Image (cartoon, rainbow, N blue to C red):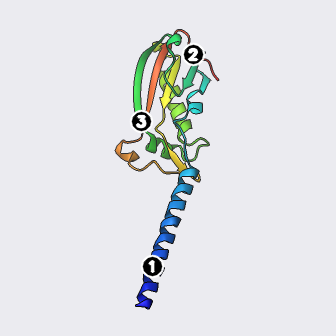
């Protein structure tokens, strides 16, 4: 009897140890994982790029404010997973591909007077620099949303 009692105590201690290790690793994993795109600092960024017609395109990551007096001209979306794969060997990965795509679209549609564009990249969680949210991206879950505007007072670069 005494021997069985020692075994059950040992099993309980082993289970408790495994449970504590699992809880500790979960906390560490959560602390080290980062949310890349949906944060207040990223949304404030606005960049200016020269166009072929001599005008300037401002590119931001959220819709322009009401005081910019903007009219939506065009919207489109694209798979972020495929875009990231296409930009594998570029410095900013998919960001460079999206920027080039937006600039090519605006240059091709110069007659529309587009002077501001917004890009909404799906949120991506990373752990130690490894993206975790591309699961399901090929099925259309990770779509980059691009919107093109004609603004009276386009947002200024920050």
The residue mark sitting in front, 3 or 2, is 3
Instruction: Pinpoint residue 105: horizontal percent, then vertical percent.
Output: 47, 25
Q: Nearer the viewer, residue 26 or 36?
A: 26
The residue mark sitting in front, 1 or 2, is 1
Residue behind mark 2: 53
Q: Which mark is residue 136?
A: none
Instruction: Pinpoint residue 102: horizontal percent, then vertical percent.
Output: 50, 28
**Is 28 placed above or below 89 here?**
below
Residue behind mark 3: 78
Q: Nearer the viewer, residue 116 or 89?
A: 116
The secondary element bearing badge 2 is classed as loop
Looking at marks 1 and 3 on the same chain, the residue that comes earlier in the sequence is marked by 1
Label 3, label 2: how far apart the Cα atoms are:
26 Å
The secondary element bearing badge 1 is classed as helix
Q: Residues within 10 Å of mark 3 (few under 14, many from 20)?
A: some
Q: Nearer the viewer, residue 48 or 22?
A: 22
Looking at marks 1 and 2 on the same chain, the residue that comes earlier in the sequence is marked by 1
Tell me the residue at 47%/41% (across/down). 83
Tell me the residue at 46%/21% (across/down). 148
Residue behind mark 1: 11
Q: Quadrant of the C terminus?
A: top right
Instruction: Pinpoint residue 103: horizontal percent, then vertical percent.
Output: 53, 26
Cβ–Cβ below 8 Å for labels 1 and 2? no
Label 1, label 3: how far apart the Cα atoms are:
53 Å
């Amino acid at each position: 009897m005494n021997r069985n009692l020692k075994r059950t105590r040992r099993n309980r201690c082993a289970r408790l140890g495994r449970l504590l290790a699992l809880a500790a690793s979960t906390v560490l994993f959560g602390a080290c994982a980062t949310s890349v795109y949906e944060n207040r600092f990223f949304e404030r960024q606005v960049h200016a790029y020269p166009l072929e017609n001599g005008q300037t395109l401002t590119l931001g990551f959220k819709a322009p404010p009401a005081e910019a007096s903007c009219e939506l001209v065009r919207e489109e979306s694209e798979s972020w997973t495929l875009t990231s794969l296409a930009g594998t060997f570029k410095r900013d990965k998919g960001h460079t591909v999206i920027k080039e795509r937006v600039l090519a679209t605006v240059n091709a549609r110069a007659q529309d007077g587009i002077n501001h564009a917004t890009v909404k990249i799906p949120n991506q969680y990373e752990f130690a620099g490894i993206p975790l949210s591309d699961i399901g991206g090929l099925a259309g879950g990770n779509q980059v949303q691009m919107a093109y505007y004609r603004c009276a007072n386009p947002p200024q670069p920050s």
